Amino acid sequence: MKSPSVKELLTATHILQEVVINGWVKTFRSNRFIALNDGSTINNIQCVVDFENFDENLLKKVSTGAAVKISGTLVESQGRGQKVEIQVKELTVLGESDPDTYPIQPKKHSLEFLREKAHLRVRTNTFSAIMRVRSTLSFAIHQYFQKNGFVYTHTPIVTGSDAEGAGEMFRVTTLDAKNPPLTEEGEVNYKEDFFAKETNLTVSGQLEAETFAMALGKVYTFGPTFRAENSNTSRHLAEFWMVEPEVAFNDLDANMDLAEDFIKNVISYTLENCKEDIEFLEKRLLDEEKTKPQAERSEMALIEKLKFVSENNFKRVSYTEAIDILRNSKPNKKKKFKYPIDAWGADLQSEHERYLVEKHFKCPVILFDYPADIKAFYMRLNEDGKTVRAMDILFPGIGEIVGGSQREERLDVLLEKTKALGIDEEELWWYLDLRKFGTAVHSGFGLGFERLVLFATGMSNIRDVIPFPRTPQNAEF
Ligand code: 4AD
Ligand code: MG
């Protein structure tokens, strides 16, 4: 007999059926009520034990965290709070859980404490809800692109290029760290390394995705990316997942349209299909907000915020307009920004992005046409000669969630750029080839998946929305 899940039983219409179910004990109350969960839903099923019929020593082993197998009858519940419950006929403790040492007790634990128990934290309501939402968001992403004719493209994890040119890469090597082979000049000789060249973990699949877009038209990647930036913030991971669509013949406007439609779609799909988890996370957030001063509380509850984003247009503003707004803003005049804005050309920090989204426009914002100097080499130069066709999407509570651009498709302009930046053309020969053979306008963007999960769950630290976070000084588990 296939055991049903807790989720299936809680919505069962066929009462009085005999069932067998496996799960973990959340709580065992009054030697009578087991709250059982198997991970299929945020809700537990109540299993009622007639303790007179069971061995006392067996019941002692039914403690929080224990794995059990229960056979019994699904009946309409006598008590309040649940529609159905199981009257237990047989109870087997499959795996005990010592109540004195099990860290996940049925009480509130701090998120910091749970980060140190990342192998067990997914057993809590909060983390199981987050991880189900994460799974649904992933599915929604694939569904969106597949429905719209995009080809899922697996770009390499090990690469020789630095797509973003920020030099924040993890080296991949099999050379002996203590005794590497050296060149005559005394440098490490990577010709003797596994790939006979310097290689690193990818920071972005974009450059390879571009090659596929120039043949398959519409493609997307969805995979892990790695950045060795030493940013110990609540928005940065050293290993994170990125979604990168790339579309031939799309200009920047079409790119912005795609990004906006895509985000709205995956959010509304997840809201519909993870309702109970998101309702739970909304309550959690409201409780947490009660402990904050009024001014720091968000104006919208989680579900309202998700609906707002999926139903309203994002505001599109050029970098130049944004700088004017920021320059004349109250916090800038009162010197409240850590990085004051005084001139065109300044790179925007998270504090500026959040001011624009949360205080000024009060909706998601797409900033476009950034100064060329603060953006990557591959972005298309505008006629003004100083801005590029870049776009960043900024979200409330998050800041930058998407970074994208129209790509430079003109060989001569691209070569000028790589020369000016000292980028080795020989390393990029295959990327430059795309501009020699059937070049065309094309665009794409990268969405930081964990930042989207942060937004959808209302969590505030990126370490809490990925199963096992990798951050500076931390690669436990
Ligand atoms: O803006 P980024 O660096 O853009 C790219 O990598 C482009 N190649 C994308 C493209 O056009 N195909 O990164 C894209 C997004 C950011 O907007 C942010 O959401 C996320 O990736 N991101 C990070 N998320 C978590 N931790 C980090 N260290 C991140 N760095 C970037
Ligand atoms: Mg960016």
Image (tube, rainbow, N blue to C red):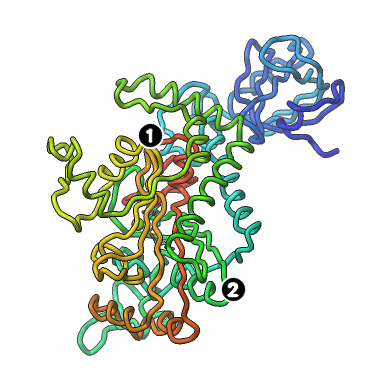
* Displayed quadrant of residue 355: top left
Q: Residues within 10 Å of mark 1 (few under 14, many from 20)?
A: few
* Residue at horizontal 37 percent and vertical 42 percent from the top: 398
Indicate which label's residue lies in the foreground, 2 or 1.
2
- Where does residue 449 sit, x and y in percent of width and height? 47, 50
The residue where tag 2 is placed is 216
Q: Is residue 385 left or right of residue 3?
A: left
Residue 287: numbered disc: none
Residue 96 visible at all: no
The residue where tag 1 is placed is 112
Which quadrant does the N terminus fall into? Answer: top right
Task: Inspect the image, locate mark 2, and give the three-letter code of the amino acid beneath it.
Answer: Leu
Task: Reply above or below: 474 against 124.
Answer: below
- Where does residue 211 sit, x and y in percent of width and height? 50, 76
Assign ligand 2 to one image quadrant.
bottom left
Task: Inspect the image, locate mark 1, and give the three-letter code of the amino acid beneath it.
Answer: Glu
Question: How far, Cα to Cα, is label 2 from label 1?
Answer: 45 Å
